Image: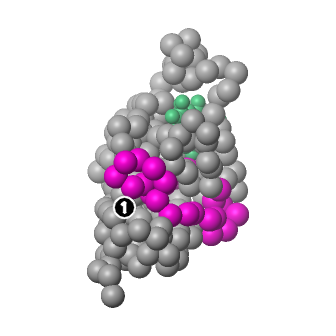
């Protein structure tokens, strides 16, 4: 495998401690693969996962992140089955975040989990909902590709909608290091009124 995952020296623990000391990782609330911190899709001026998974990237060659199932133009009120597909060789654990927002940053439409691998978070401090993996959804069965399923119901209006997503192909060492982060964005408009 030539993914360069052997680059982590013995300093992992030191680096995590340094991150905690710098306030980047509050030491009492260390995030886990099954407790994602919303607000890290890279859209609307947000950070992406590389603010903590900071060893490389985002979007190094050799991997990809794709949002499948979106129409070119949505029908207001219609539901769509979406798939978030992270492809990167040698993934041992994985996670993601997905948002759908109006241009003003507010929530566009409604998400519901497609299966037990996905949860929908609605943080009070943020204007939109965040779809993310569950503990079950962070477990990787195929090391070259991970898929998360989510239903999305389009809002009643007809304005443009912006989707942002970020995902982490992790090496499974329960640290933020040695992981590969990918980001993607899509914008769709409504089908023309009948
Ligand atoms: C505020 C810092 C922070 C942010 C932001 C963050 N993570 Fe993490 N993440 C961590 C830490 C610390 C760990 C290691 C501790 C643990 O696994 O609980 C970790 C671990 C993980 C793991 C398991 C890694 C492994 O190799 O075992 C996954 C998967 C993961 N994060 C996904 C994500 C995704 C996806 C994002 C962005 C949408 C993200 N994280 C954003 C701090 C962060």
In this view, the residue in front, 45 or 155, is 155
Q: Residue at x 41, y 35 (%)?
A: 47
Whether 38 is among the magenta residues is: no
Instruction: Tell me if mark 1 has few (under 14), some (14-19) or many (20+) residues whose alpha carbon lies within 10 angstroms of its own.
Output: many
Queried on whether the Cβ of the residue with tag 1 lies below 8 angstroms from ligand 1, the answer reads: no
Outermost residue on the top side: it is: 21
Residue 2: x and y, percent?
Answer: 37, 48
Residue 157: x and y, percent?
Answer: 41, 68
- Left or right: 131 in relation to 101: right
Residue 13: x and y, percent?
Answer: 58, 20
Q: Which residue is mark 1?
A: 161
Q: Quadrant of residue 137?
A: bottom right
Residue 45: x and y, percent?
Answer: 35, 37
Residue 164 appears in view: yes
Q: Is residue 146 above or below residue 180?
A: below
Mark 1: secondary structure: strand
Whether 105 is among the magenta residues is: yes
Q: Name the quarter showing ligand 1.
A: top right
């Amino acid at each position: 495998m030539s993914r360069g995952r052997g680059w982590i020296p013995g300093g992992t623990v030191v680096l995590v401690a340094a991150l905690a000391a710098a306030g980047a990782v509050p030491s009492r609330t260390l995030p886990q693969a099954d407790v994602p911190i919303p607000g890290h899709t890279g859209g609307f001026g947000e950070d992406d996962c590389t603010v903590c998974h900071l060893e490389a990237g985002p979007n190094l060659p050799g991997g990809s992140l794709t949002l499948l199932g979106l129409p070119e133009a949505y029908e207001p009120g219609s539901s769509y089955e979406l798939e978030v597909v992270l492809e990167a060789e040698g993934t041992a654990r994985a996670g993601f975040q997905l948002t759908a927002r109006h241009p003003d940053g507010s929530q566009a439409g409604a998400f519901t989990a497609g299966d037990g691998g996905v949860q929908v978070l609605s943080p009070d401090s943020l204007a939109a909902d965040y779809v993310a993996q569950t503990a079950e959804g962070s477990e990787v069965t195929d090391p070259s590709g991970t898929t998360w399923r989510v239903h999305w119901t389009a809002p009643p209006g007809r304005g443009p909608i912006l989707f942002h997503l970020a995902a982490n192909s992790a090496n499974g060492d329960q640290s933020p290091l040695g992981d590969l982060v990918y980001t993607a964005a899509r914008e769709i408009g409504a089908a023309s009124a009948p």
